[in-house]
Amino acid sequence: MSQPAIKLYGFPLSGHSHRAELMLSLLGLPSEFILVDLKQGAHKTAGFTATINRFGQVPAIDDDGTVLADSNAILVYLATKYGKGQWLPSDPVGQARVQRWLSAAAGQLHAGPATARLAVVFGADVDAAAAISRAHALLALMEQQLSETRFLAGEQPSIADIAFYTYVAHAPEGNVSLADYPKVRAWLASIEALPGFVGMPRTAVGLQSQ
């Protein structure tokens, strides 16, 4: 019996949506992208918040009736159910190292590169200068980590890398240069070389999402 397509509710320029899209592709899972028109506020409608994500954000997935939201939660779910132990370690220390970076993805990554990009690409009313400063502080930490390990949580790629990839790769869209971070640039290239990699569009105008 073939795997039914996993429905991915998202927006093409949402880095959070791309996390889920990239993970689905790396796992080779059949999927159907369902556009949530953020420009029209589709993510805030009663129908969407009642049946897909009560927080009114993208992405969300529907895996044969199992509906889940939040990009990091989706990564954990997909890796656990379909990853065959390749994307989320089974040992306590390995899991904790991945979780540390997932927390940073929800914190420093969001407050830094993601917010700086929101100011430029989405016209969000944020303190762009402060976001750029936070982005460089985070990139310096990543550079240090990647001088010790090939990937963020060790020598093998994990969902920690997928959680970070998109907003780091697209950081220049928010006027955050990657020129001073050779290890980070090499890490991006390693992710892009993975079988099944799919990128996110680099230019367009959209609306702020999760």
Image (spheres, rainbow, N blue to C red):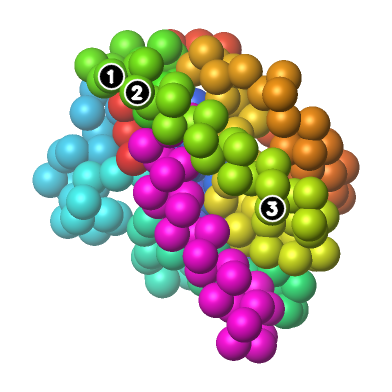
Front-most of residues 50 and 141? 141
Q: Residues within 10 Å of mark 3 (few under 14, many from 20)?
A: some
In space, the residues marked 2 and 1 are separated at their CA atoms by 6 Å
In-image side of 77 versus 86 (left or right): left
* Residue 95 magenta-highlighted: yes
In-image side of 114 versus 164 (left or right): left
Name the residue beneath numbered marker 2. Answer: 130
Query: Which image quarter holds the N terminus?
Result: bottom right
Name the residue beneath numbered marker 1. Answer: 127
Marks 2/1 in contact by CB < 8 Å: the verdict is yes
Task: List the single residue furthest toward the bottom.
Answer: 91
Q: How many marks?
A: 3
Q: Nearer the viewer, mark 3 or mark 1?
A: 3
Front-most of residues 24 and 124? 124
Which region shows up in magenta?
A: 88-114
Name the residue beneath numbered marker 3. Answer: 145
Against 133, is 77 above or below? below
**Three-letter residue code for mark 1:** Asp
What residue is rendered at 35% in x and 17% in y?
128
Provide the secondary structure element on which disc 3 rests.
Answer: helix
